[in-house]
Amino acid sequence: MITTTQGQNSNFSSYLKEKYPQNHAHYRLNKFFSFNQEKGIITDWNEARNMLVTEDFIIGLIEGLQEEVGDASSVIMYDIGYQWGIKDCHFFQQWFEKEYNQKIANMNLKFVLEAWWWPFISQGWGNWEVDFSDQQNGFLFVNIFDSAVARTLGDVGKPVCHIYAGLFAGFFGRLLKKQLSCIEIQCYSMGETYCKFLLGKQDKIDAATFWKNEGANAKDIEKKLRHGEFLK
């Protein structure tokens, strides 16, 4: 069961947040979420509306798209994630600067990103790890452990976390004020232990896409990028 944000609703703020507005350790179930049983509304610490869905919802969404548009379903899921990332970046900037009383530009980027992803962990989207070691080369890697999508679909032999890729491209692009794209180069649904995403400019993504289609695995793609190989 996962939780997805559904926009802001400040009418149902958390009692604990009202009492302890500067408490940053608020990601336990009984702290982060506020359940209004009378109205059937779930809000989180950041005053966003949430909804609970089952794995059947994820399967129905993806299989329904595939039935309607075929292979283009992955593009649609990416676009959904991308628009979500852009909007969530704006929402994140609002609640982060209010909670920490600091401008994001003045904060350590790694701290900012951890603050952004912790609500996603609480909502069931999985833990993550961001590899900044290649940032100076114009790309970075994001690892997702226990992806909600891949965990649900199981071993289907191909990448399935397109909504994550779009989310990262939209959020990081908006946050860093750059035009970024993202591709999943390793997926739990391919029998791997975790999902791995490449985030960078379009030329890097195009090269990784070509190599992946030619049979390269994630380690091959990492090696090629770090050795400065590009498409001609």
Image (tube, rainbow, N blue to C red):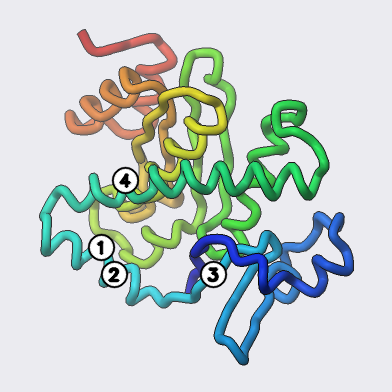
Q: Is residue 111 above or below residue 94?
A: above
Quick one: 47 or 179, which is closer to the camera? 47
Quadrant in which the C terminus appears: top left
Hey, what amino acid is under mark 3?
Asn
Q: Are marks 1 and 2 in contact (CB under 8 Å)?
A: yes
Q: Earlier in the sequence, mark 3 or mark 4?
A: 3
- Residue where numbered disc 4 is placed: 78
Q: Are marks 1 and 3 in contact (CB under 8 Å)?
A: no
Hey, what amino acid is under mark 2?
Ile
In the rendering, at what x and y percent does residue 119 appear? 63, 57
Q: Earlier in the sequence, mark 2 or mark 4?
A: 2
Q: Comparing marks 2 and 4, which lies closer to the viewer?
A: 4
Residue 59 numbered mark, or none: 2
Task: Report the Cα–Cα distance between label 4 and label 1.
Answer: 12 Å
Residue 150 left/right relative to 47: left
- Residue where numbered disc 1 is placed: 62
Q: Secondary structure at mark 4?
A: helix
- Residue where numbered disc 3 is placed: 50
Q: How many marks?
A: 4
Q: Secondary structure at mark 3?
A: strand
In the rendering, at what x and y percent does residue 152 appear? 37, 67
Residue 205 left/right relative to 84: left
